[in-house]
Amino acid sequence: MAYNLTKAAINTFTLHLAQLLGPRGITVDAILPGIVDTDVNASWLHTPEGQKQAIGMSALGRVGQPSHVADVVAFLASSDSRWISGQLVDATGGSHL
């Protein structure tokens, strides 16, 4: 429950900051990364059951890699995303669709 509360707080904080900082030309977005193959998930993700579960949740049929999320971060940090603000960007590979 505490984990979900912190995620909800970040989402709400993102929306409020986007509105507050928009007049200064500052965009604010949050990235929702889903299951990514990192050290945090290694204990369960590096098992046959974990792989099957994670792949089964992804519409793309694979486990997310740090580079997948990094590419989204790079886009949002670039001027190419200058018209995007206040968004909760799903970078989960289509998990839970």
Image (tube, rainbow, N blue to C red):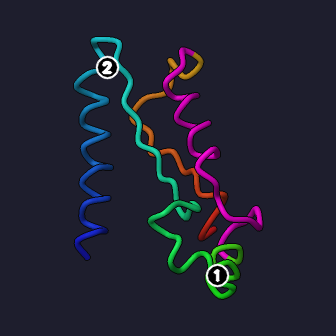
Q: What type is the residue that disc 2 sits on?
A: Gly
Quadrant including the N terminus: bottom left
Could you say which disc has been placed on residue 84 in the image? none
Look at 29% across and 58% down and name the residue there. 8
Quadrant including the C terminus: bottom right
Look at 69% across and 85% down and name the residue there. 48
Figure quadrant of residue 50:
bottom right
Name the residue furthest top: 24
User: In the image, is residue 62 part of the stretch drawn in magenta?
Assistant: yes
Name the residue furthest bottom: 49
Question: Crowding near pointer 1: few (<14 within 10 Å), some, many (20+)?
Answer: some
Label 1, on which residue?
Answer: 53
Rendered location of residue 84, percent (x, y): 49, 27
Q: Main secondary structure of the magenta part?
A: helix
Rendered location of residue 45, percent (x, y): 58, 75
Left or right of 56: which side holds 50? left
Q: CA distance from mark 1 to mark 2?
A: 40 Å
Would you say the residues marked 1 and 2 are in contact, meaning their CB atoms lie under 8 Å apart? no
Q: Is residue 51 above or below residue 84?
A: below
Dot 2: element? helix
Q: What type is the residue that disc 1 sits on?
A: Gln
Rendered location of residue 63, percent (x, y): 67, 64
Question: Crowding near pointer 2: few (<14 within 10 Å), some, many (20+)?
Answer: some
**Which tag is nearer the camera, tag 1 or tag 2?**
1
User: In the image, is residue 92 part of the stretch drawn in magenta?
Assistant: no
| First reached walking from the N terminus: tag 1 or tag 2 | 2
Look at 50% across and 77% down and name the residue there. 43
Label 2, on which residue?
Answer: 22
Look at 58% across and 62% down and name the residue there. 37
Figure quadrant of residue 79:
top right
Question: What's the magenta region?
Answer: 57-79
